[in-house]
Amino acid sequence: KAGVTQTPRYLIKTRGQQVTLSCSPISGHRSVSWYQQTPGQGLQFLFEYFSETQRNKGNFPGRFSGRQFSNSRSEMNVSTLELGDSALYLCASSVTGGSFYGYTFGSGTRLTVV
Amino acid sequence: TQLLEQSPQFLSIQEGENLTVYCNSSSVFSSLQWYRQEPGEGPVLLVTVVTGGEVKKLKRLTFQFGDARKDSSLHITAAQPGDTGLYLCAGSYNQGGKLIFGQGTELSVKP
């Protein structure tokens, strides 16, 4: 059974640029959540998509956006990159997104903004 | 602000020792999960606890959910070098995929 696949694994961007990260969930999982992990703030929730609809959103500026496609694959976009956006971005998939089933995380995309 | 305080932040022990990691909040959670993360990888789910007072065992790991569902603990018996990693607790209010993570406990088990 394939796990959660995130691409690319590593990315270096310049301040002001935009970036798109991709997440392919486990087959049959309809919920995809995105998290930002930094040494100072730990793991922080960005947003969650279920059946192509954003169901929940964290406290991040509007530069962070996402979407989900009909095959449950999800993309996350960050516009006008800032140095502080350097982080490990993780996506997690779940059957329904309910807390009782647990989440499977991908290996993440390491974004470095220079 | 929804917070989960995890302690200790760092733990360095010898192989064979026992340890306990704590996860505390002033909020009541629908469920609480424990994850283990290794460098360069995503967190891996260890357990989900749902009922207040629930105790779950996974080999040498014992997880407990507080009676009031505000806190949890992870106890490792006879730690081994393979247990080294970042242990994260995460609470859920069952709000559609949103987990509140603690800051993590960096565990190092020396042979």
Image (cartoon, coloured by chain):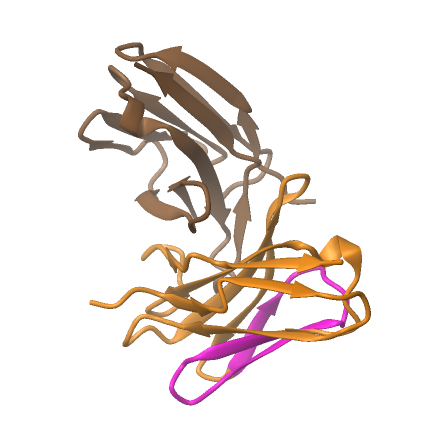
Chain colours: A orange, B brown
Residue A34: x and y, percent?
A: 54, 63
Residue A22: x and y, percent?
A: 50, 74
Quadrant where the N terminus of chain B is found in the figure: top right
Q: Quadrant of residue A54?
A: bottom right
Quadrant where the C terminus of chain B is found in the figure: top left
Q: Quadrant of residue B80?
A: top left
Residue depicted at 31% across the width and 10% down the height: B17
Numbered marks: total: 0
Residue depicted at 62% across the width and 59% down the height: A111
| Left-right relation of A5 to A20 | left
Q: Is residue A51 above or below residue B88?
A: below
**Does the magenta run of residues contain A3?**
no
Q: Is residue A101 above or below residue B24?
A: below
Residue B67: x and y, percent?
A: 40, 30
Residue depicted at 40% across the width and 32% down the height: B85
Q: Which residues are drawn in magenta?
A: A53-76
Residue depicted at 45% across the width and 15% down the height: B12
User: Between residues B18 and A108, which one lies in front from this camera angle?
Assistant: A108
User: Between residues B43 and B97, which one lies in front from this camera angle?
Assistant: B43
**Does the magenta run of residues contain A68?**
yes
| Left-right relation of B77 to B65 | left
Residue A71: x and y, percent?
A: 38, 86
| Left-right relation of A86 to B54 | right
User: Between residues A31 and A23, which one lies in front from this camera angle?
Assistant: A23
